[in-house]
C-alpha cells in the first residue's frame, strides 16, 4: 500500500483555541438533509410517494427545517416539492429548504418550485477548495468569488418577486474543509455583503466537511477560526454539515458545536454521499444520554427503521449506534453478569438516574425489550442464563444453582455452536428439572401438626407427614416426622430406605411463580451426598409444600443420575 502518495493535513494555527474547554448544554438547530444529500447518494433515488412518506416521518420526529431536495435537478424533485406545497403538507412551524447551484437557470427553476410556500430557505453553494478551483472550475479566487456573488445577487433579486414566501438564505462554501481559511472567510464575507442579513433575518453560513479530510479537532479549529474572523457573526447562523469519510463525522459535528456553531445538518442513520452524512440520531441521542433534551423524538425507533429501510432501500447495520438490533445485547458472560446486577439494583432503588454497566441508555427508551439485552451462546455465563429464566419466565434460581444450570446450557451451546433462545433455555430447564418421570412419584400427602409433646414418638412441636408414593408401578405409604414438612418428608424417605446414608439438605428457597388465585409456587432444594457432591431439584405446585416435596424428589433423582 503506497501511503507515500498521501500527505498530512496541515493543522490550523490557533494556539488560543477555546473550544476544548467548552461543553454542549443544549440542542443545536437541526436540519435534515435526508431528502437531498441522502437521496442524491442512493442507487435508486426515492420516488415522489417515498419522499412524501419520509417527509412525514421527519415531521413526526420533530424536525423544523428539512432540505427537501434539489428541485431544479429533476422532474421528480420538482414535483415532490410542488405536491408538498399544493397539498398543504408543510406545517406552519416547519421551513422547507432547497438546494441550488449558484447558476442562473437553476436558481430560476428553484424559485418556480417554491412558489406558494409560506417559508423557505434557499440554499446555494459553490465549491471553494483548492482542488476544485483547479480541477473543476479552473478559475482564480476572484472568479470563484464572482460565482458566489452573482448567485447571491440573482437569488435576492428573484426572491423580491416572491413576497408571499418568507425567504431565508443559506450559503455553503462547498468543500470548505479543503479551502484555505482566509479564502473561505473572503468568499463568505462577499456573500454576506450582498445578502445583508440582520438580527431578524440571519443568514445561514454552512461550513461543510464535504469530504472529511482531517481529525475532528482540526475541523473544530476551522470552525472556531471562522466564528472569530467572519464578518457580522451576530447576524449569522453558523451551520455544520459533516460527512463521515474518516469515520468521525459525529465527533467533528460535536467538536464543531463546541467551537461555536449553532446548527447541524445531517441525515437519519447517516445516509448520504460516500460514507454518508453525520447521523443525526447518534448526535441527538448522545445529547439525550447526557441529560440534555435533544428536541427530536426517536422513541418510536422501530417504526423509523421500517420506514427508512423501505423508502431508501438501505439497511441499518446491527451495530449502528443506538438503533442497531444488537447494540443493547450482551452475549458475553461478564457483561451479562454486570447488566443483571445493575438492573436488579436499579429496579430496587429509588434513584431515577440511569447508571448501569454496559448500557449507556435504558433500552426501553427506544422500545428495545429486555428480552434482547441478554442472549445466550457459548460466550455466556451463569448470570446471563439466570437472567433469561428470571426475565422471561419469572424463575429466580438461587445463586448457588446458577453454575449447575449454566454448565448444562454451556454443554449445549458448545456442541451447537450457535445461540440458544429464551424458549430453548426454558425447554432445557423444564426437561432437566420439571418433567415428571422420576424414580419416586408422589401421589398424595397429608401433613399433621403435632403441637404437644408426644412421649411416644419423641417429637416435639413438629409435623408428621403421611405420603402415598409410587416406585416402579408399585404404590406404598411412608411416614415421617420433622420440624417442618420438608424435614418430615426427608425423614420419611430415610426411614423407608429411599435415601442413602449421609445425604443432607443443604439449601432451600421458594417464591411465587404467578400471582392471583391460580398462582403457582416454585421451590429449589439442594441435596449433598457424603462426598460433598450436590444437585439441585426444582418443584412447581399450587402449594408451597407441594412444590417443596417435588423439588426434593427431583434433587434425589438427579443425585441418583450423578456420574
Ligand atoms: C456536495 C454536494 O452534495 S453538492 C450537491 C450535489 N447534488 C447534485 O448534483 C444533485 C443534482 N444535480 C443535478 O441534477 C445536476 O448536476 C444539475 C442539474 C445540478 C446540473 O446539471 P448539468 O448542468 O447538466 O451538469 P453538471 O452537474 O455536470 O454541471 C457541471 C457544470 O456546473 C458547474 N458547477 C458545478 N457546481 C457549480 C456551482 N455550485 N455553481 C456554479 N456552477 C457550478 C461546473 O463547473 C460545470 O461547468 P462546465 O460545464 O463549465 O464544466
Ligand atoms: C451542498 C453541500 C452543503 C453539501 O452537501 C456538502 O458540502 O457536502
Ligand atoms: Mg453533503
Image (spheres, grey):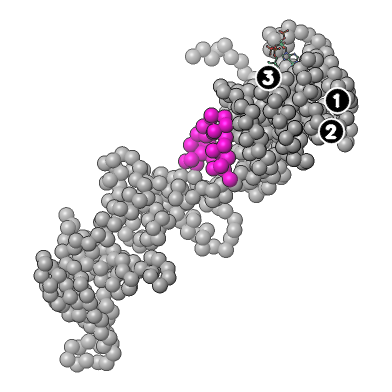
View extreme (front): residue: 87
In the image, is 299 to the left or to the right of 156?
left
Q: Position of residue 346 (x, y in %)?
A: 52, 58
View extreme (top): residue: 138
Res. 417 image quadrant: top left
Q: Position of residue 518 (x, y in %)?
A: 38, 70
Query: Do callouts 1 and 3 mark residues in contact (Cβ within 8 Å)?
Result: no
**C-alpha span from label 2 to label 3:** 24 Å
Q: Between residue 265 and residue 367, name the one nearer to us.
A: 367
Which residue corresponds to the image point at 36% horizontal and 68% vertical from the top-left?
A: 520
Can you tell which mark lies on residue 159? 1
* Image position of 102 with respect to 337: above or below: above
Q: Between residue 306 and residue 479, name the one nearer to us.
A: 306
Q: Between label 2 and label 3, give the one nearer the viewer.
A: 3
What is the secondary structure assignment of the residue under circle 3?
A: loop
Q: Between label 1 and label 3, give the one nearer the viewer.
A: 3
How many residues crowd mark 3 within 10 Å: few (<14), some (14–19), many (20+)?
few
Q: Is residue 251 magenta?
A: no
What is the secondary structure assignment of the residue under circle 1?
A: helix
Find disc 3 in the rendering and name its residue.
74
Find disc 2 in the rendering and name its residue.
166
Q: Is residue 309 magenta?
A: yes
Q: Between residue 305 and residue 197, name the one nearer to us.
A: 305
**C-alpha span from label 1 to label 3:** 21 Å
Query: Do callouts 2 and 3 mark residues in contact (Cβ within 8 Å)?
Result: no
**Stretch in magenta:** 300-327
Amino acid at each position: 500500500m503506497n501511503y507515500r502518495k498521501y500527505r498530512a493535513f496541515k493543522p490550523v494555527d490557533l494556539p488560543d483555541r477555546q473550544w476544548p474547554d467548552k461543553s454542549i448544554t443544549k440542542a443545536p438547530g437541526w436540519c435534515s438533509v435526508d431528502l437531498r444529500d441522502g437521496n442524491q447518494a442512493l442507487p435508486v433515488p426515492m420516488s415522489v410517494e417515498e419522499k412524501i412518506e419520509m417527509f412525514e416521518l421527519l415531521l413526526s420526529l420533530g424536525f423544523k427545517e428539512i432540505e427537501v431536495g434539489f428541485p431544479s435537478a429533476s422532474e421528480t424533485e420538482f414535483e415532490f416539492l410542488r405536491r408538498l406545497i399544493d397539498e398543504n403538507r408543510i406545517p406552519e412551524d416547519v421551513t422547507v429548504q432547497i438546494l441550488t447551484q449558484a447558476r442562473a437557470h437553476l436558481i430560476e427553476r428553484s424559485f418556480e418550485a417554491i412558489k406558494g410556500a409560506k417559508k423557505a430557505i434557499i440554499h446555494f453553494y459553490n465549491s471553494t477548495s483548492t482542488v476544485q478551483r483547479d480541477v473543476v472550475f479552473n478559475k482564480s479566487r476572484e472568479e470563484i468569488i464572482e460565482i458566489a456573488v452573482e448567485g447571491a445577487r440573482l437569488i435576492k433579486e428573484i426572491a423580491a418577486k416572491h413576497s408571499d414566501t418568507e425567504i431565508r438564505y443559506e450559503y455553503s462554501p462547498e468543500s470548505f474543509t479543503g479551502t484555505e481559511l482566509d479564502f473561505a472567510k473572503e468568499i463568505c464575507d462577499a456573500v454576506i455583503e450582498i445578502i445583508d442579513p440582520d438580527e431578524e433575518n440571519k443568514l445561514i453560513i454552512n461550513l461543510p466537511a464535504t469530504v472529511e479530510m482531517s481529525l475532528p479537532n482540526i475541523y473544530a479549529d476551522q470552525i472556531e477560526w471562522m466564528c472569530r474572523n467572519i464578518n457580522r457573526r451576530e447576524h449569522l447562523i453558523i451551520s455544520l454539515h459533516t460527512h463521515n469519510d474518516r469515520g468521525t463525522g459525529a465527533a467533528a459535528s460535536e467538536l464543531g458545536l463546541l467551537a461555536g456553531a449553532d446548527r447541524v445538518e445531517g441525515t437519519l442513520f447517516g445516509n448520504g454521499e460516500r460514507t454518508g452524512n453525520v447521523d443525526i440520531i447518534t448526535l441527538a441521542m448522545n445529547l439525550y444520554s447526557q441529560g440534555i433534551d435533544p428536541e427530536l423524538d426517536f422513541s418510536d425507533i422501530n417504526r423509523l427503521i421500517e420506514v427508512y429501510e423501505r423508502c431508501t432501500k438501505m439497511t441499518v447495520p446491527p451495530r449502528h449506534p443506538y438503533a442497531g438490533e444488537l447494540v443493547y445485547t450482551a452475549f458475553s458472560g461478564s457483561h451479562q453478569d454486570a447488566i443483571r446486577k445493575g438492573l436488579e439494583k436499579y429496579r430496587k432503588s429509588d434513584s431515577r438516574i440511569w447508571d448501569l454497566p454496559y448500557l449507556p441508555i435504558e433500552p426501553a427508551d427506544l422500545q428495545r425489550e429486555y428480552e434482547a439485552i441478554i442472549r445466550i451462546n457459548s460466550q455466556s455465563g451463569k448470570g446471563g442464563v439466570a437472567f433469561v429464566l428470571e426475565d422471561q419466565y419469572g424463575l429466580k434460581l438461587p445463586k448457588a444453582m446458577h453454575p449447575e444450570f449454566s454448565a448444562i446450557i454451556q454443554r449445549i451451546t458448545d456442541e451447537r455452536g450457535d445461540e440458544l433462545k429464551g424458549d430453548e433455555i426454558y425447554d432445557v430447564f423444564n426437561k432437566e428439572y420439571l418433567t415428571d418421570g422420576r424414580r419416586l412419584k408422589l401421589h398424595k400427602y397429608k401433613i399433621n401438626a403435632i403441637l404437644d409433646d408426644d412421649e411416644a414418638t419423641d417429637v416435639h412441636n413438629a409435623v408428621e407427614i403421611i405420603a402415598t408414593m409410587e416406585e416402579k408401578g408399585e404404590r406404598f405409604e411412608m411416614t415421617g416426622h420433622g420440624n417442618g414438612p420438608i424435614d418430615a418428608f426427608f425423614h420419611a424417605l430415610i426411614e423407608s430406605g429411599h435415601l442413602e446414608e449421609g445425604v443432607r439438605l443443604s439449601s432451600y428457597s421458594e417464591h411465587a411463580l404467578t400471582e392471583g388465585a391460580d398462582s403457582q409456587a416454585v421451590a429449589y432444594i439442594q441435596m449433598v451426598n457424603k462426598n460433598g457432591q450436590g444437585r439441585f431439584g426444582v418443584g412447581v405446585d399450587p402449594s408451597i409444600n407441594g412444590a417443596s416435596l417435588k423439588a426434593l424428589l427431583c434433587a434425589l433423582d438427579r443425585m441418583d443420575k450423578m456420574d
